[in-house]
Image (cartoon, coloured by chain):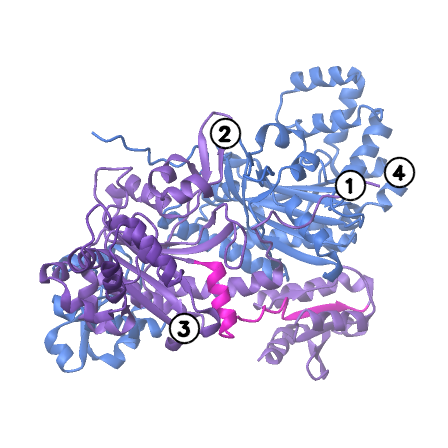
Chain colours: A purple, B blue
Amino acid sequence: MPEYLPTAPYRGTRDFLPAEMSVRTQVFDHLYEALERFGYLRYDGPILESAEIYERKSGQEIADQQLYTLTDRGGRRLALRPEMTPSVARMIAGNAGSLNFPVRWYSHPNCHRYERPQRGRVREHWQINADIFGSDSANCEIEMFELIHALLGSVGATEDMFLVRANDRNLLGSALTDLVGVSAEQLGQVFGLVDRWEKYDKDKLAEQAAEIGLADKQFERLGDVLSAGTALLDELPAPVKEASNLVKVLESEAASLVRFDPMIVRGLAYYTSTVFEVFDTSPENNRALFGGGRYSDLAGMFTSQQIQGIGFGMGDVTLMDFLDTHGLTPKPRSEVDVVVIPVAGELAGPARQVAAELRKAGLRSSTPLELRKLGKELSRADRAGARAVVIVGQEDWDAGNVTVRSLADREQQTVALGGAAAAVRALLD
Amino acid sequence: MPEYLPTAPYRGTRDFLPAEMSVRTQVFDHLYEALERFGYLRYDGPILESAEIYERKSGQEIADQQLYTLTDRGGRRLALRPEMTPSVARMIAGNAGSLNFPVRWYSHPNCHRYERPQRGRVREHWQINADIFGSDSANCEIEMFELIHALLGSVGATEDMFLVRANDRNLLGSALTDLVGVSAEQLGQVFGLVDRWEKYDKDKLAEQAAEIGLADKQFERLGDVLSAGTALLDELPAPVKEASNLVKVLESEAASLVRFDPMIVRGLAYYTSTVFEVFDTSPENNRALFGGGRYSDLAGMFTSQQIQGIGFGMGDVTLMDFLDTHGLTPKPRSEVDVVVIPVAGELAGPARQVAAELRKAGLRSSTPLELRKLGKELSRADRAGARAVVIVGQEDWDAGNVTVRSLADREQQTVALGGAAAAVRALLD
């Protein structure tokens, strides 16, 4: 007995069979369309990158524990990209001379991280990345928030289903320093603590605050600051607020797109001011769907030119969960519109000819590959989601005709070959 | 002075900036559409697979020299897929119980091979895979040839630009054995020699034939067989021909889609009967664009169930070269249809509102992120390929109006906000 290899995909990766792929394609096509309506241009890049670009920039957790690395036969140390930002930074830096900044770019790469597989965590995920490069205007922040609403709207979400929570790390830094009395040395660690604020219980947070060296009173004050919402802004110094793009957003007509929330910090090291996270408001799925932020120096490891940017990455797993939770997952598309069935093997050629005519008219059309009884082919066409079949019989064919049959009501009509496409089309609506 | 990392992508891989990506997207969308009109369903799978599936099946050259491998933290030996067939075989085997055979599937994966980069050879390439699984009927061969013509037709190729050359390895095997006197032990090596027939000069071929142990007369006879074309069929035994799907194709109405050519063998180990290659007929680019064939036991390493298949893989590099050679490469799409320009910073909000209205009407619309002079924004909109701009001025806006300007003839008109989309649309055609 031969030994068979397992048919499951590598742990943490996924096979997308046609039904699931059809759902995904519909969702992503809506997102691409929404992005292109805003003038975002799609790009793509290699999965393999120099390992060094992640070790320098993506934060220690990714580089130390999550990177898939390999060495090629020429001795180059490579990594499967864990995220798109370093790749796009490389491209922007390499082409900065010919780009007309600011530019709006998007991509849809797959990214690899070595994670322990669990709900919402996979090792290969697909991520829509959208960024503006080369502008520090608050108009960018406003557009990002508009775009997020448009993207989620394009897949059927209504405004009550999600919430965009935004912060500015500089506002938070000022609050921590001026209002909580956090020292410059403690600041990085306290940011980390804030990032864990909603994940841990209060005792654990207090313990960690004490380890950082915060007094009990400071810890209490920190809790007040983080839950203050917009009221916090009244306590911050004017110059800090005037420098904040997010404050400009909150003073604009776009304020309703976003909620100021001092608790949002985002883990990734390269965000420098605005940060945001989009939350599912459903009680069953109350968690961050995706997020992003602004970076003041995107491509510093590739060029001396300082390039600002703002953007986000929307992962497929949490997005699909969101759609499922809200009943927004589209149905798989039918396999074909119409099946052309020859009643005998000798009529396979004529059936192919009819199918070719139907395709020219834009109809998705197939012919059976193997000769089966008509009844079997009819139920097969039904299972494939076809709305009609065209039956090719010898007598009809000799007279230049075919039979068009509705699979919904089983009514059929004999039509001239040239009229078949229109007769089928009439059954599709 | 800091040390900057190189901005070039890893050798043999490619960055696709927006202009090139737009060209590719247009081409691939045509191909997807053509495939879906034939009822082919898209699937996808992980880039990382167990290294073992390639070592068992893909042929020694790939496994020994071309595979990118790595070991994960759990000690699993993985490879970046060098081709899609083993992955899809795994999926088909794992889901055979719920599939309604025969099935038509397609995919568009990127595949990695460690090649010495040169024209037409990259280390990461994208490949359209189309296959029928679960049928041994000659209708499959006919459909494959129809599909190839439809795919190339969908991107603008006419019938004179390419040629489908097809063979049946069993016909060739019979010819080599019966007509050339090749022994069973020599057969594999002679297939290899045939595969190199058009690449090497005659002296080199003769030398290699001698090494295999062919007599001079046999080598001469081999040359006659390979250049005999359809006439060869007359010399082959009837049972061999009756068992050949390709012979059935040549006797059908679809014979004109393909040329029988005994010289086609294809390198890949798993093809078992029909093999084909599509050639560019242009003198500047006379070479194989892509190819495929039939395999009698697709998933033998995963299951005892014998699953037939036939399919092909169409790589992006040769396809794009083909389109270039024949002047068929589409132009990049414009970045937007229309740019909405506020004449002052305070009008950025109204401009966003206008742009949102235009997007709802299906128009790709952007607003400037930074405040520049109108003239600068007009030329910027022109460079972006916009056909129109909408100018938002304070007085107009207070009266509920905007100015719609054609970038082609610079004519402009003042219209009510609600009429802006229609006025812009009129300028697009």
User: In the rendered structure, which segment of residues is drawn in magenta?
Assistant: A315-343
- Residue marked by disc 4: B237
Depth check, mark 3 against mark 2: the one in front is 3
In the image, residue B356 lies in the stretch drawn in magenta: no
For disc 2, the chain is: A
Q: Quadrant of residue B188?
A: top right
Q: Do the residues marked 3 and 2 share a common chain?
A: yes
Residue at image position (26%, 63%) is A220
Instruction: Identify the mark at residue A72; answer none if there is no mark.
Output: 2
Q: CA distance from mark 1 to mark 3?
A: 49 Å
Q: Do the residues marked 2 and 4 share a common chain?
A: no
For disc 1, the chain is: A
- Tell me the element at label 1: loop
Instruction: Identify the mark at residue A281; answer none if there is no mark.
Output: 3
Residue at image position (71%, 78%) is A405
Q: CA distance from mark 4 to mark 1?
A: 38 Å
